[in-house]
Amino acid sequence: MNIYADRISQVRSLMRERGYDALVITGSDPHCSEYFSSRWCQVKYLSGFGGEAGDLVITEDHAGLWTDSRYFIAASQVLPEAGVALHKTRQVDSVMIPQWLSGKDFGEGKEGPIVIAVDGRSQSYGSVKAIDSAMKEAGREYEIVNVPDILDELWEGRPPIPQTPLITLGEDITGESRLQRLNFLRKFLLMNGYDAVLLTALDEVAWVLNVRGNDIPYNPLVISFLLVTMDEAYWFVQKEEIPPSDTESADSFDEVLEDGVQILPYADTGATIVDLMEGGEDGEGGIDKLFLDPSTLNYDLYCTLNEHALPGSLVMGGSPVPLRKAVKNPVEIEGMREAHFEDGLAMEEFLYWLEKTVQSGQRVDEWDAACYLHSRRERIDGFRGESFETISAYGPSAALPHYVTPMEDAPVLEPRGLYLCDSGGQYLFGTTDITRTVPLGPCTYEEKEDYTLVLKGHIHLAMAVFPKGTAGCQLDVLAREALWKKNRNFGHGTGHGVGFYLCVHEGPQEFRQNFNPQPLLPGMITSDEPGIYREGLYGIRHESLLLCVDGGKNEFGQWYCFEPMTLCHIDTSPVLVELLTEEERRYLNEYNAGVYSKLSGSLPEEVRVWLKKKTERL
């Protein structure tokens, strides 16, 4: 039996023993993170699917994984052997987990309520509430049971909660002190009449406290919760005895303490907040109104708090931090400029090496290419690792939007067709995310046409001028129109926010067809990454980061536009020039000329000469 099928069989045995009709395992952690540590790779442990977005439902006669179009091909390659069905999300006819459960036939012999078990420690309150609402609406008799860490008794050697070295960032790097950001939250409390706010998203905690760690691969985060009241701040963090050699962590914790933040055990989060809500030892002056974000509050913690809360004392709403965090201040913007300058130098050296190596006939595979790019970035002062796992993909591999490059037996790059590299770096002064698709030799007409159509969309979005109040969903069509006119499309979003030495994916803004009313604001940095994917053949994506800036004001109102942050040329050799308008050619020529102007003085001579030719006007 397949190892994953065997594990699902063990789960079903446990479910039968306990009388569960369905078990929901969400691909996340206690902070509802997009990326998470190995401890919470529960969906992968059970099904073999390792994508960032995937939720699993197991019943007696069905096991299903819900994920979006980025992972359809990858999921279809691993799920069948595990006996798991693929449920496609973000499709016109998608049936999501709550609706699927509410319509599921659990058998004619079923007696009593349908028992739905959820691992509430790694599932948001909001997602469990959605299941609850769907079952009610369908008129089903049901019960939702919270079973935190249910896999503990089955998962031998399950990784522990990580604890990595801690650093703090000064105001000279972040542009704001820890106290300023805590006071921002206290102003929020004062204006809304709340006594406290609990931050449950890891990037929000890191941003407010100006701390960074490595508890999650590629994300400089510290697994923790932060409770802020008008007078106090409580940081619940996994902090065992700090090794004597780790003086930086010790000093960092001391800095946080000096700013009046109490450091308490991570495991005591729920009990401590309950005690504070009940008024502490004297029973007076407790937290009467606690503000929580249901999208990142895990269901298990909600149950703990709700059990002891008075009616109306738990107030649910969107955290104020994501929007404030997304609008970068001048210091952060300058740091991001520095990150993109240094990253651009690394990218140009990498692309030069790649072209010369492949053309020389020397053997190089996808993994070799990823390693070489890493070697260029790690020479940069302030480099703290990749911002996500590098997607180094040649030919058919690139048809998988979130391809995982294998360390062993990786496909060899050949002097023909297209190679796609989606990568980024974490630096003390910023975060980068860039995709370049380049020819390794002769390309087919279809490859050139697709390359050009995707590039047209990339340019259209980058050139956008729009009035104040415009949301990303209203601009998304600019990146798709050229493809749509040829009856082509891509299934993922067009762009996401990027953090400042934080998560490479952040909100609340985005470019996506789904309705998101968040207006774009000056200071927001968002990716522009349309693509096209032909299964078994190739994939193309052009990605740069755009800074939203003031575009002027007139009698028609305030206008905004974009400034490209990414500094790396766009290869024009596969472009079908006849498909570009004069305006598109001008933008491409000016962009490439700007890259050469800014980077050439800091590049090795041979790379500078090569880049000069690569950026010649069309």
Image (tube, rainbow, N blue to C red):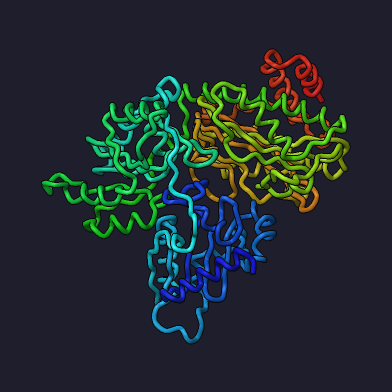
- Tell me where residue 433 sits by quadrant: top right
How many numbered marks, from 0 up? 0
The residue located at (72%, 28%) in the rendering is 350
Q: Relative to 191, say whether 289 is above or below.
A: below
Q: Relative to 505, say whether 62 is above or below.
A: below
Q: Is residue 202 left or right of residue 316?
A: right
Position in image of residue 133 (x %, y %): 41, 66
Instruction: Judge whether residue 217 can be spotted in this image.
Output: yes
Q: Can you name the residue that lies furthest to the front here?
A: 244
Instruction: Judge whether residue 564 can be spotted in this image.
Output: no
The residue located at (54%, 30%) in the rendering is 384
Q: Is residue 20 left or right of residue 553?
A: left
Q: Relative to 258, say whether 57 is above or below.
A: below
Q: Is residue 230 left or right of residue 112?
A: left
- Tell me where residue 498 sits by quadrant: top right
Position in image of residue 322 (x %, y %): 43, 39
Q: Quadrant of the N terminus?
A: bottom right
Position in image of residue 92 (x %, y %): 62, 61
Q: Is residue 105 left or right of residue 150?
A: right
Q: Quadrant of the C terminus?
A: top right
Position in image of residue 518 (x %, y %): 48, 42
The residue located at (25%, 55%) in the rendering is 312
Q: Can you name the residue that lies furthest to the bottom here?
A: 109
